[in-house]
Image (tube, rainbow, N blue to C red):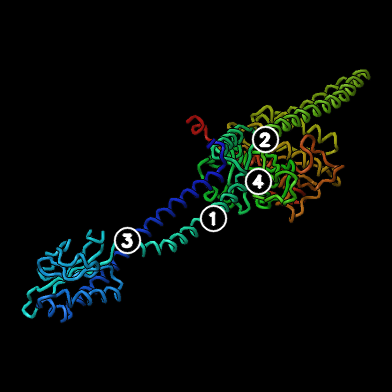
Amino acid sequence: MFHSWSIARRLFVANLLFVLALTAAFGAFSLLEARDRAYGDAGSRMRAISTSIANNPLVLQAASSGDPSAVLQPYALKVMSEADADFITIMAPDRTRWTHPRAEELGKPYIGTIEPALNGNTFTEVTAGTLGPSVRTISPVKDQDGTVKALVAAGVTVRTVDTDVADRLGVIGGIALVVLTFGSIASWLLGRYLRSVTRGWGPEQLAQLFAYYESVLHSVREGLILVDTRGKAVMYNDQAAELLGLEPSDADRSPAAAPRLADLPFDGSLRALFESGRPAHDEIHLTGSRILVVNQAPAVAPVPGRSRQKPAVYGTLATIRDRTEIESLGTELQTMKTLSDALRAQTHEHANRLHMIVSLLELGRTPQALDFATKDLELSQQLTDDMVASVDEPVMSALVMGKAAEAHERGVELVVRTSGSSGVRGLEIQDLVTILGNLLDNAIDAAAAGESPRSVELVVEAGAAAVEFTVRDTGSGINPDSIDDVLQYGFSTKSPAASTGGAHGRGVGLALVRQAVQRLNGTMTISNPGGAQFHVVLPVPDPEEEQA
């Protein structure tokens, strides 16, 4: 039964029991303190009475007379009445009573301790006498020589003291009742607040829910990151840490110790999205090495039932998917399409040239046909030899030859200049295809849209430390104010009708180029020397470092 209780109920019961125990302890302490104080006050009052009587010359004179009781009994009864004492006993040093509240006790021995008083000291004790237990003070009566001639005992019964204590119980009980009432109200208010916060769940249920939450959080293949209203990444799973380059999340870390967005290694567009908190649906964001699809929505608390209460917003929750492999496949597909188009264009060109050669042969002009075929073979072979000599990579050579055929088909002359012979060993061929293919595509599009003469120049310089690509066109160039924007995902200067982005759509190519250049630790500069010019420098890895 206890395990089915909510945290609010458990806290209410525990706090109520604590208040009850505290009230009981306070009451007992107050009662004991009041009792001790009452006994102390009674002792002080009796001491003052007994001392005053002992210092009265009447008592010393009566003690020397033949019948002390005749003088002292009326005096003692009067003082006892006025001083509100239960008894005043004046006695001889041998304990013989000269006064007593009960006349039949006169002449009988006093019950109690008198030795300290016989020694000349006043003392107080609690002891039982003829009237029952009492608080009494015994003082000596001395003559001028200091000889004890009599003893005075003044006291009140314990029953009288307890009556005084009982009078104080009402105040103590009232205070205890107030403490119990306000403690119970505070427990109820705190329990009500916790019930609303924990939704009436017990700690076992919350622990189980946390276990479910942890298992779901770390089992999903999408990255999840929760940013609170203060701009802190209070929660993210392992996939998000991998995609965003973060430290693994610590489940025991409190929200107060969560890192701020400003301290995390996010790129500009991702940081702006997370800091804005705006809703996002399938937005593409590029990091240094990944292409991410991000969805973002407010993180709100569920509202029970059909309540019209506005849900509380705790921050924003973003889901992140890795699209790098898909884009890589798209790049490969685009490359295959380029090669296919190149083969188609070359097939068309070769068919025309074969018709020309056959026609010359039919006309009996064999020397002219042979000369035409030789020159055509020399041009194709020269482009192939230049690319292979400078960049010893068949895929790159095929890509450039395909782009040359495509450019020729669109009325654009592709001029290729190469130098060096170190090759591109150590560089990822997929990244090279992404860089060079997108740059040539954009250059051919720009040149084809410009005025004659239409041309694109590709300069490849393969050195021992780096490979440099320079692509320039005769198009309209790039607005200097837009140079930083053209590298952002989704930015394009082309109209939708003119876009030939293929599988990637508009505003993607240069963003992918920038990402690939960064991934290869290279640099890229953009200028406008009569048209757009892109200059890419890629460092070639040291073979010894790769082997190490």
Image location of residue 339, percent across then percent down: 77, 28
Q: Which amino acid type corresponds to the residue marked 1 in the rendered image?
A: Ala
- Is disc 4 surrounded by few (<14), some (14 to 19) or many (20+) residues within 10 Å? some
In the image, taking residue 54 as reference, residue 146 lies left or right, namely left
The mark lying in front, picked from 4 and 3, is 3
Q: CA distance from mark 1 to mark 3?
A: 40 Å
Residue receiving disc 1: 186
* Earlier sequence position, callout 1 versus callout 4: 1
Q: Position of residue 186 (x, y in %)?
A: 54, 55
Q: Provide the residue designation for mark 3.
A: 159
Going by the numbered disc 4, the residue's amino acid type is Met
N-terminal of the two: label 2 or label 4? 2
Q: Earlier in the sequence, mark 3 or mark 2?
A: 3
Q: Nearer the viewer, residue 468 or 141?
A: 141
* Location of mark 2 (residue): 324
Q: Is residue 366 above or below residue 457?
A: above
- Residue at 92% x, 18% y: name it: 364
Q: CA distance from mark 3 to mark 2?
A: 94 Å
Q: Amino acid at mark 2?
A: Thr
Mark 2 lies on a secondary structure that is: helix
